[in-house]
Image (cartoon, rainbow, N blue to C red):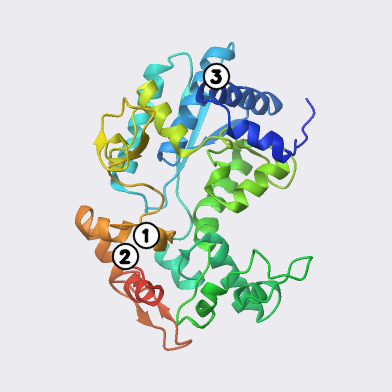
């Protein structure tokens, strides 16, 4: 089978995003079939225990059970960074068992991996994950080089082809260039991506991930450039849910009765003022608990959260984790930068600096 990317036109992307849920499910099965077939079944599902990858694992299990005879195994890879919610840690094992019962024809293998560095070591060396991956990476590279495109973006000086200020400028966060602590997006690469890369090299398996194009500009652009299945490049990656939305994910979980991690609370329907039972799928569905379940101490997007944010929430739901995250920290006598200590990561100083409550 030929392995080439299939870039999308704007019209094609809009058509995929506009599909109703049942058609999206069918299209995802087609993308899974394309990916598994291309690699002879040597694939794995990146399973974080979050709601998106929970749906992806279900889709992959259903595909393997219904469309492959005999079915290839379902390999689930969970990178245990030590930063996941305890509820997620518990759910990962429970869900693998549920899939084994639900899809008895499929051999479900759960691989739990550990990174080489812990969070304190990563933050001490590379800095804090705040604002967004795009901004944090921009700050990191600008401070390393002292000039160039990233510095221009943070100063609002980058121009587009027409000579107008570029849409990629992020001068709002230019003050982070002078922050008394390091800022970067390296945490995800060091703790998750590198760990997954080592697994891929050892097992010769290609990843399938639950990233969705509507989660950010960079993901949308990558989807447009490669299509759902990115065969070309250094790291081929299947993304069969690229055209799904969070609403699709929640509705699919409710309609199929799929279990999900308890840290999300209940999935309920809302008319903007009141919550109702999740059966009212025409209303907007949302979770009554955590809205996201990545690493507990990740600061990406925290400044955008309305009402009680993630740090305020874990203060009363996971007080020991909160103390480790917010507490500790000290200025390094060698370089003068704020860094974690054995008592904690020292996020209080960082969140104060960017104006995020905790």
Residue 173, x across and y down, in percent: 52, 73
Q: Which mark is residue 325?
A: 2
Mark 2 and mark 3 lie on one chain; the one further toward the N terminus is 3
Q: CA distance from mark 2 to mark 3?
A: 41 Å
Residue under numbered circle 1: 297
209 shown above or below 29: below
Q: Nearer the viewer, residue 336 or 242?
A: 242
Do the residues under discs 1 and 3 have CB atoms within 8 angstroms?
A: no
Q: Residues within 10 Å of mark 2 (few under 14, many from 20)?
A: many
Residue 163, x across and y down, in percent: 77, 71
Mark 1 and mark 3 lie on one chain; the one further toward the N terminus is 3
Looking at the rendering, in which quadrant would you find the C terminus? bottom left
Residue at image position (66%, 37%) is 13
Q: CA distance from mark 1 to mark 2?
A: 6 Å
Q: Nearer the viewer, residue 66 or 258?
A: 258
Is 169 left or right of 280, judged from the image as shown? right
Q: Which mark is residue 64?
A: 3
Do the residues under discs 1 and 2 have CB atoms within 8 angstroms?
A: yes
| Secondary structure category for the residue under label 2 | helix
Q: Quadrant of residue 165?
A: bottom right
Q: Residue 65: in sight, yes or no?
A: yes
Is 231 left or right of 172, judged from the image as shown? right
């Amino acid at each position: 089978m030929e392995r080439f990317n299939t870039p999308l036109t704007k019209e094609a992307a809009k058509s995929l995003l506009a599909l109703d849920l049942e058609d999206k499910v069918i299209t995802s099965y087609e993308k899974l079939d394309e990916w598994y077939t291309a690699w002879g079944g040597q694939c794995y599902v990146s399973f974080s225990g979050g709601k998106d990858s929970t749906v992806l694992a279900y889709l992959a299990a259903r595909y393997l059970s219904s469309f492959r005879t005999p079915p290839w195994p379902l390999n689930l890879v969970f990178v245990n960074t030590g930063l996941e919610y305890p509820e997620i840690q518990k759910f990962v094992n429970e869900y693998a068992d549920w899939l084994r019962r639900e899809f008895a024809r499929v051999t479900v293998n759960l691989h739990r991996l550990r990174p080489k560095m812990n969070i304190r070591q990563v933050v001490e060396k590379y800095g804090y994950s705040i604002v967004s991956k795009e901004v944090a990476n921009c700050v990191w590279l600008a401070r390393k080089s002292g000039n160039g495109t990233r510095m221009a973006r943070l100063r609002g000086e980058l121009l587009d082809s027409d000579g107008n200020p570029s849409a990629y400028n992020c001068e709002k966060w230019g003050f982070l260039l002078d922050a008394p602590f390091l800022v970067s997006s390296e945490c995800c690469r060091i703790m998750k991506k590198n760990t997954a890369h080592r697994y891929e090299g050892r097992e010769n398996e290609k990843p399938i991930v639950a990233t969705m194009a509507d989660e950010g500009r960079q993901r949308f652009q990558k989807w447009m450039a490669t299509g759902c299945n990115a065969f070309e490049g250094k790291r081929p990656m299947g993304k069969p849910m690229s055209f799904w939305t969070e609403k699709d994910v929640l509705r699919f979980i409710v309609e199929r009765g799929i279990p999900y991690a308890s840290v999300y609370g209940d999935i309920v329907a809302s008319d903007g003022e009141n919550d109702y039972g999740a059966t009212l799928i025409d209303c907007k569905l949302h979770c009554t608990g955590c809205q996201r379940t990545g690493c507990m101490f990740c600061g990406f997007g925290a400044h955008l959260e309305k009402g009680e944010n993630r740090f305020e929430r874990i203060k009363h739901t996971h007080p020991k984790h909160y103390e480790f995250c917010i507490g500790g920290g000290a200025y390094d006598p060698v370089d003068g930068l704020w860094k974690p200590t054995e008592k904690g990561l020292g996020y209080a100083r960082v969140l104060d600096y960017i104006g995020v409550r905790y």
